[in-house]
Image (cartoon, helix red, strand yellow):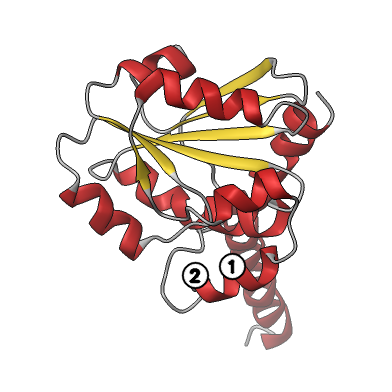
Amino acid sequence: MFPKRPIALAGALALAAVLAVGLVQLADRPSLSPTSPAIQLTPAQMQARLAGSPRPLASLHAQADELLGGGARALGARLAALRGWPVVVNKWASWCEPCKAEFGIFQRAAANLGRKVAFIGIDSGDTSHTEPLGFLHSHPVSYPSYYDPSTQLGVEVSDSSLVPATVFYSRRGNKNYIRQGAYPNVAKLERDVERYALEG
């Protein structure tokens, strides 16, 4: 009769190996974006976090979830008014699935950093106000977006027609970095804000 202990030990080692592989695979997966209602901030929570922001940033928070017109001229005037502040511009569209996945990430980052960094959106490619306004109602953020149905503004700012895209401006107004594609988590976005906007 064969001893049972080596068989049991082999089984335990095999189970441990399977668990180790599973943990490594889990660690390699990008974090889920906080877009579900259970972990999404409410507009009131965002405003409470951002209360007392400096005037140029507070003016953005006062226009939370608004779609603004005026195209490149209006956005250019806004960026000029924000000179001296780091700026992050996120280009999105209501029909863009990766944009939906990362919007909760921008919500959190803007609430965390919005007292020292300006966040602005560009709604690029939606041909009516209905869909993007519904999108913003479901995915609230603490800043406005400029309406860009022709995509011309979005291409000018991000050097691409792709969405999503994120553009980082330094305090001097220099365009330091353009990221094409969605952010996987808040930590990655905040690291890029620190590197390309706050330190740029």
Q: Report the front residue among 59 and 122.
A: 59
Residue at x 43% of width, y 61% of height: 140
* Helix, strand or loop under label 2: helix
Q: How many marks?
A: 2
Residue at x 68% of width, y 52% of height: 114
Mark 2 closeness class: few <14, some 14–19, many ≥20 residues within 10 Å: some
On the rendered image, what quadrant is the N terminus found in? bottom right
Name the residue that disc number 2 marks.
43
Residue at x 73% of width, y 85% of height: 5
Q: Is residue 188 visible?
A: no
- In percent of width and height, residue 27 lies at 64, 55
Three-letter residue code for mark 2: Pro
Q: CA distance from mark 1 to mark 2?
A: 5 Å
Q: Is residue 23 visible?
A: yes
Residue at x 55% of width, y 30% of height: 78
Q: Report the front residue among 195 and 151.
A: 151
Three-letter residue code for mark 1: Met
On the rendered image, what quadrant is the C terminus found in? top right
- In percent of width and height, residue 51 lies at 70, 66
Which label was assigned to residue 46? Answer: 1
